[in-house]
Image: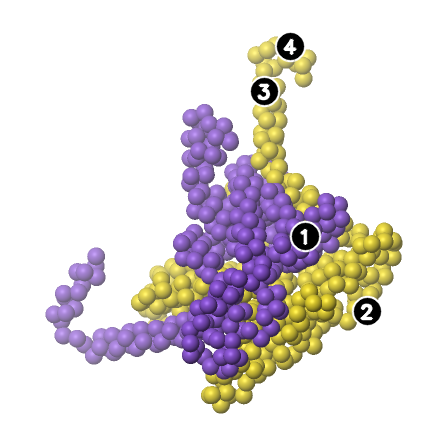
Chain colours: A yellow, B purple
Amino acid sequence: MSTLTTSTPAAAARPAGLAAKRRRSALKTLAFMSPWLIGFAVFFAYPLISTVYFSFMHYDGFRPPTWSGTKNWRYVFENYPLFWPALRNTLWLVVVMVTLRVVFGLGVGLLITKIKTGTGVFRTLFYLPYLAPPVAATMAFAFLLNPGTGPVNSLLEKAGIPAPGWFNDPAWSKPALTLLALWGVGDLMVIFMAALLDVPTEQYEAAELDGASPWQRFRYVTLPNISPIVMFAVVTGVIQTMQYYTQPLIAGKVASGVIQGAGTQFEPGYPDKSTLTLPQLVYNLGFQRFDYGSACVVALVLFALSMVFTAFLMRRRGGLIQAGD
Amino acid sequence: MTQVLDKPVSLKAPVSPAERTARRRAVLEWIAVHSLGVAAALFFTLPFVFVFLTSLMSDSQALSRDLIPHTWEWSNYRKVFDTPGFLTWWKNTLIYAGLGTVLTVASSIPVAYALAKFRFRGRNLSLMLVISMMMLPPQVVIIPMYLFWAKQLDLSGTLWPLIIPMAFGDAFSIFLLRQFLMTIPNEYLDAARVDGCGDLRTLLKVVLPMARPGIAAVALFQFFYAWNDYFGPQIYASENPGAWTLSYGLESFKGAHHTDWNLTMAATVLVMAPVILVFFFAQKAFVEGVTLTGVKG
């Protein structure tokens, strides 16, 4: 490059200037991106590779890790008693909780667009539960749904309706968690509300002129217009279910009455493994059983499942990424 | 405008039967919609109401099935504050949430700006990786991360393993900010460049003032994230009660006051209240953030 610049300054200044400009631009990009590049390497790429490595090692955190081949993998899939119940629970939550949350969120979103008096107050009231910190909200529901003294069962019994055991009954613990999730539906309500207000009013007017019933208007005008948002809500709901940790853990702990830090260890899933989810298994294996290798196996299963749905989300909503140009 | 013009005309004209049924239907619909709205409002607010009422009951009444306190025991809240550790949890939560929010915002803005406005090879790949990181459950990489912080840096029993990473950009914040910065027209940036502004000056003097609502949304989300986080403190702080946060301590509070639902509910109210107060002060920024990440694109 230096040889070029010495020959004919006028002609050579251009390519050299261009190269310098390009290099400056690359350095500039690098500088702006650097916080995330470091974060990506240290808090994502390295630990992910390390997780794969540990999944083939026997490691208890005290003695140095030793190679154990596929032993951890076989243990998790064949002998670890909590794995399949956790996976079944996850499936249940995906089918029931995610579906109900989307339907309910859409319903509340529709309702709020129809409310003409006091809209702001209603919207705030509907949204607030979403903000309640998960530990506090779960604690509140553990109290509300407490079979012995909780207000919900008091009211149900006064009304002559048989009161379920909620968080203390394996058949009712997941419905109770679903109720808690429906209470915090505010995020979906806001998203659906925005989408519903974006539907062109001309289409409703045209449908009305054609004599369409309210249901037909919803089915043939509203739904096609908001279907990408419904899809988005379903897929993010599934991804959130993969991360579902605090609520089932706290609900199980509070209902079981096991006191933290008193020498007794709480095995997650109370009652009868019905509130187990995959993230809880990572904690149980890694930090209660000190079997880091098997914990990494579950972590990788969790990773694979999350990435499948994330890839699906990115493909479906390509606009999310290409919107730049 | 047209409505104003129409009104006197329709008043003068005799009301046709068809018009009357239409009007009656509108009234009925109003009643139906608002009754549903009230029912939904009860579903969303009654849990708060019951929790609050129970938090004011006497110890013995909290064990009964009563819904309304006989005597209003405001001293329950004093008792919660007097619980050893409660103020420490409060302080730790503020440090975690406050410092974490500042670091996250400061480190995420330049990354989001580059992803939104620079053209470079690997930009789409970077964005896809940001989204992947955003969707990843924290438990996936927790084993190596814990070993890194606890065994190599000897920082377990503190909140630093949760705060330090926030100085290196948070995926969700980067994504949300990027979505917001995309809405700023390039003309503003070009104008700044013509005026001789470098990229850093453009970011600080032109982009940041325009991005204030987006930054507010990110700061709020990050603050709430730290406030609500249970898993992080459970992993890194559990061994040292001096490092517990409110969300983590609340659960042990329940353990220590096993049957005192009144005190547990008072503590629950005290953990919920700040979040709700912050929301009332910053409602607009918050709702904007939710719609931005969900719908824009």
Please determine whether, in this image, residue A233 is positioned above or below residue A35.
below
The amino acid marked with disc number 2 is Glu
Residue B233: x and y in percent read 63, 56
Locate residue B88, reporting x and y percent: 57, 55
Give how far apart the Cα atoms at labels 4 and 3 are: 14 Å
**Spatial separation of the CA atoms under disc 1 and disc 3:** 54 Å
Element carrying mark 1: loop
The residues tagged by marks 2 and 4 sit, at their Cα atoms, a distance apart of 73 Å
Residue type for callout 4: Thr
Q: Which residue is tagged 3? A: A17
Q: Is residue B145 visible?
A: no
Q: Look at discs 3 and 2 and give the one toward the viewer.
A: 2
Say which mark, if any, is on residue B157: 1
Chain designation of label 3: A
Residue B194 lies in quadrant:
top left
Q: Amino acid at mark 3?
A: Gly
Q: Position of residue B4 (x, y in %)?
A: 18, 60
Most distant residue in the left direction: B12
* A234 relative to A211, above or below: above
Q: Which residue is mark 2?
A: A78
Closer to the observer: label 2 or label 4?
Answer: 2
State yes or no: discs 3 and 2 in contact (Cβ < 8 Å): no
